[in-house]
Image (cartoon, rainbow, N blue to C red):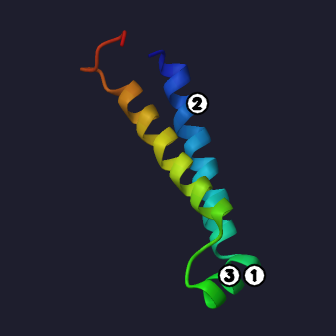
Amino acid sequence: MNKRIAFGFLFFGSVLLILGWCAYHSVDGLVAHALTGGSTDAALWFIISGCLAGITGLFGLDPGHPKQF
């Protein structure tokens, strides 16, 4: 994987994690957590996709990782 693409995945993953964190701690997220005991679907999807994008970026930056899949 190209290093630029890997850095893009890392950046995009961190943005998604920040958006998920903000959605989780928003007023809507706190009300949903108080009423249902869980968080909103949007917050969970932001956090999950941010983690996956970040992990993909980290594997792309690994020098021992093969260049082609």
The image shows residue 68, relative to residue 61, as above or below, that is: above
52 relative to 35 in the view: left or right: left
SS for callout 1: helix
Which residue in the rendered view is the most extreme toward the top?
Answer: 68
Of marks 1 and 3, the one in the foreground: 3
How many residues crowd around disc 2 within 10 Å: few (fewer than 14), some, or many (20 or more)? Answer: some
Residue 18 placement (x, y as % from top left): 62, 58
Residue type marked 1: Val
Q: CA distance from mark 1 to mark 3?
A: 9 Å
Most distant residue in the right direction: 28
Mark 2–mark 3 CB contact (< 8 Å): no
Q: Residue 32 shows which numbered tag?
A: 3
SS class, disc 2 = helix
Q: Which mark is residue 27?
A: 1
Mark sitting earlier along the chain (1/3) = 1
Q: For the residues labelled 1 and 2, say whether their Cβ atoms are less than 8 Å apart.
A: no
Residue 45 % position (x, y): 60, 54
Residue 61: x %, y % from top left: 39, 27
- Mark 2: amino acid: Gly
